Amino acid sequence: MAADLSQIVKAYDVRGVVPDQWDESLAGLFGAAFAEVTGAAAIVVGHDMRPSSPGLSRAFALGAAARGVDVTEIGLCSTDQLYYASGALDLPGAMFTASHNPAQYNGIKMCRAGAAPVGQDTGLAEIRELAERWLESGAPEPAAAPGTLTTRETLDDYAAHLRSLVDLTSVRPLKVVVDAGNGMGGHTVPTVFAGLPLTLVPMYFELDGTFPNHEANPLDPANIVDLQKRVPAEGADLGIAFDGDADRCFVVDENGDPVSPSAITALVAARELARNGGTGTVIHNLITSRTVPEVVKENGGTPARTRVGHSFIKAEMARAGAIFGGEHSAHYYFKDFWNADTGMLAALHVLAALGGQDGPLSALVAQYDRYAGSGEINSTVADQAGRLAAIRAAYAGRPGITLDDLDGLTVSAADWWFNVRPSNTEPLLRLNAEAKDEATMTKIRDEALAIIRA
């Protein structure tokens, strides 16, 4: 295997095709490198349901143990369950998953003790350098005293911790359809929802890393079609879809209509502010709806805007002491969950909010869905910088319009805004637009696209 890991070591994690791009021998080197970079005496390791996950996870554990590190293996788990273990045990952790990627992929999400993120600037670059060096020269000499491997069950404790963070005592009986996409939601949902006044209609709860029914990526509308049909057919109150490693959740209302993740962010923000006495900072990224900062202010909080990407959200959560953070990609971050993201906790908030009043979900979320949005539109461009400069030239100096460069270029007016940002990995520009009504949004969206695609 070539000693260039740039294709699989990404900004926030390791991800690639198994065994073509990486395998168990390399996983062992990553384990040794993780031990070295964290300097930890003990770590915790978990994995998802992909066929390659148990072997890769065990190889990583053995690599770390050979460096003298004691390893707690928690086995099958969701990514947020691994974060729970890292936080509750105060240990660095490694989660083997490729989230929503196709079956042939696998990856590692790593964190320091207390679920603090490991990214390029916080240890991942050093882990890659060590693994590359050892690929060339051979694995490092084992420690004089190897570490131990022990197994531990954490699912019940994880579920109890989540339920302790949401008041579910006044929830009325609800019927909920959950599409786990053959991912880890099928493992965690039955335990987390146990004892709640819910009639659970499970879809694709069988753990199967080949994803026989649909990709476990609910951000793609094609993958929630089954759920959208099933909810009204069952007469259910709502539907929830999880991605492959169950750290993101998507919601559909009683009619089968998708609920915007920005609306969920606003709803949960209002509830978290209420839990914290009506004060606190709430983080949102810059492609989240304007509804979010409005709702945060209306509920006594302070909104803080960040770049897109979970490392930026987590860093700002820690810096600002924020109580909650949300992204339009349906990642939700909680101070009481070590600033880490957990879609399951967001789902419990939705169930508590819906079950704590008598109306349908569509009416409940209407107050949190105030604008017309385009969704993210990708355009392949040869010259990202040139197209961004063309947009700047087209809008700079227009009365009532402001430009900012926090992440790509955001163009704002009183009743609309759009953001264009380059992909880090592909020759794409990503457009998100929002306005007070559909007609204005369509006009602004099409104007921007005409420049991008000129």
Image (cartoon, rainbow, N blue to C red):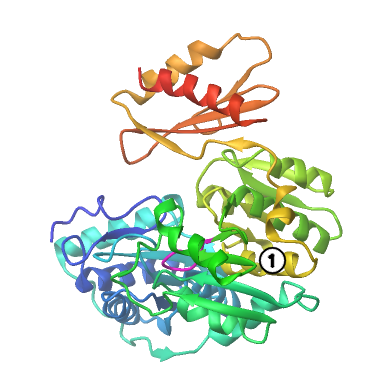
Amino acid type at image mark 1: His
Q: Residue at x 40, y 22 (%)?
A: 452
Magenta span main SS = loop
**Horizontal and vertical percent for residue 206?**
39, 80
Quarter of the C terminus within the rendering: top left
Magenta residues, start to end: 243-249
- Which secondary structure, mark 1? helix
**Horizontal and vertical percent for residue 106?**
30, 65
Front in this rendered view, residue 174 or 55: 174
Residue 342 visible in the snapshot: no
Q: In this picture, is 341 found above or below 394?
A: below
Q: Farthest right residue? A: 277
Q: Residue 253 lies in what quarter of the image? A: bottom right
Q: In this picture, is 281 found above or below 349?
A: above
Front in this rendered view, residue 450 or 330: 450
Q: Residue 240 lies in what quarter of the image? A: bottom right
Q: Around disc 1, counting alpha carbons within 10 Å, would you say few (fewer than 14), some (14 to 19), or many (20 or more)?
A: many
Residue 340 visible in the snapshot: yes
Q: In this picture, is 73 found above or below 389?
A: below
Front in this rendered view, residue 431 or 255: 255
Q: In this picture, is 452 found above or below 54?
A: above
Q: Residue at x 68, y 82 (%)?
A: 196
Q: Is residue 197 left or right of residue 278?
A: left
Q: Disc 1 marks which residue?
A: 349
Q: Residue at x 41, y 74 (%)?
A: 204
Q: Is residue 167 left or right of residue 342?
A: right
Q: Is residue 238 left or right of residue 356?
A: left
**Horizontal and vertical percent for residue 273?**
79, 57
Front in this rendered view, residue 320 or 272: 272
- Number of dots carrying numbers: 1
